[in-house]
Image (cartoon, rainbow, N blue to C red):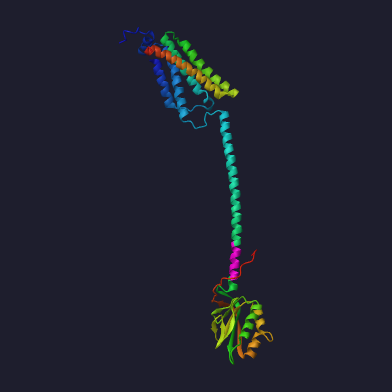
Amino acid sequence: MIAALGLLIGILAGLVFAPEVPTGLQSYLPIAVVAALDAVFGGLRAYLDGIFDDKVFVVSFVSNVVIAAAIVFLGDQLGVGGQLTTGVIVVLGIRIFSNVAAIRRHVFHA
Amino acid sequence: MPDPDIAPDPGRDRLRHALVRPSRRQAVVAVLLAVLGFAFVVQVRDTQADDTYAGVRESELIQVFEGLTGTAERARREVERLEARRDELQDEDRARSAALDEAGQRVRTLNIIAGLVPVSGPGLRITITETGGPVSVGSLLDTVQELRSAGAEAMEFNNTHRLGVQSSFGEAVGGVELEGKLLESPYVLEVIGDQHVLKTALTFSNGPIETLEIDDTATVTYEEVDSIEIESVREPVRPQSAEPADGQ
């Protein structure tokens, strides 16, 4: 419940303050959001499996975001930023799909 | 009511439990989710407000820029081509209007020479009055010829008959026939040209005036007029046989 409230508060804060994304972060923010989504779905799946640990969740959340951003940064430095961004998105997308599939089995038994 | 056929799922129970009575550990998760929601909304808004080139990578920007440079270059070449074409057309136009001016000038000159337009200018008015007998055609013709030699530009008889290239005199009862029209005394000949030269052409010894006065016993007077108006005109004659030679 508190978690859902937190999500709601975050969305509202984003709508209310509507900050501009700094130019330096513009290529990293979308990747960071997708990585965070992956961490969240992973956490939800772990919770349903009964192996959820908040420390693990925090670490995985932060490390997901940082690693995703770091890969894209590295790609930009090497001149393959666009391709690496696509690669990271594909990998995270696959993970999100498999996590959501597991969650679906728990919730709907199907 | 859980379905009796399916064993109660511990995961679903935990989820329901977490929703109904949250534990304190959820606070950390809530903070992270808040961050996620915030970032998500910001990113979505940024994407929607996107002004085409914000957040585009350097290499893509370079491609766009090169495309623009190529387009600008093409447009510049097109402008140059069109400007050259415009200059060309303007030159052509100038040449054409110069030719037209010249042609107009020639038309004016030829109209005056052919007697097709009314003219005015300085010249002489010569009045020949018969006193004894009739004036001979030869004397009149001589007078006209002398005036022509002296550079007369336009001549008119009795304010009605303009002289031209085709003009011809003939004998007639009671006067002189000019192109089928009867002229009667007094003959008033108006001439436009250099007054001094015209006067000289008339008054030299054995010249037209002397011939008219002595041989034809006519009275001849002339006056210098600063502005003679010649109103009569000739009908243009379309040549039937003559054609311009090549190169004209």
- Residue B186: x and y, percent? 56, 86
State whether residue B91 is above or below residue A47.
below
At 42% across and 26% down in the image, what residue appears? A15
State whether residue B220 is above or below residue B47.
below
- Residue B185: x and y, percent? 56, 87
At 57% across and 38% down in the image, what residue appears? B71
Q: Is residue A106 left or right of residue B197?
A: left
User: Which image quadrant is residue B136 in?
Assistant: bottom right
- Confirm whether residue B176 shows in the render: yes
- Residue B22: x and y, percent? 38, 12
At 41% across and 16% down in the image, what residue appears? A3
- Confirm whether residue B28 shows in the render: no
At 56% across and 33% down in the image, what residue appears? B64
**Nearer to the camera, A14 or B89:** B89
The question of residue B215 being in magenta is answered with: no
- Residue B153: x and y, percent? 61, 75
Range covered by the magenta-colored residues:
B100-110
State whether residue A47 is above or below residue B192.
above
Q: What secondary structure characterizes most of the magenta part?
A: helix
Residue placed farthest to the front in the image? B241
The question of residue B107 being in magenta is answered with: yes
Residue placed farthest to the right in the image? B205
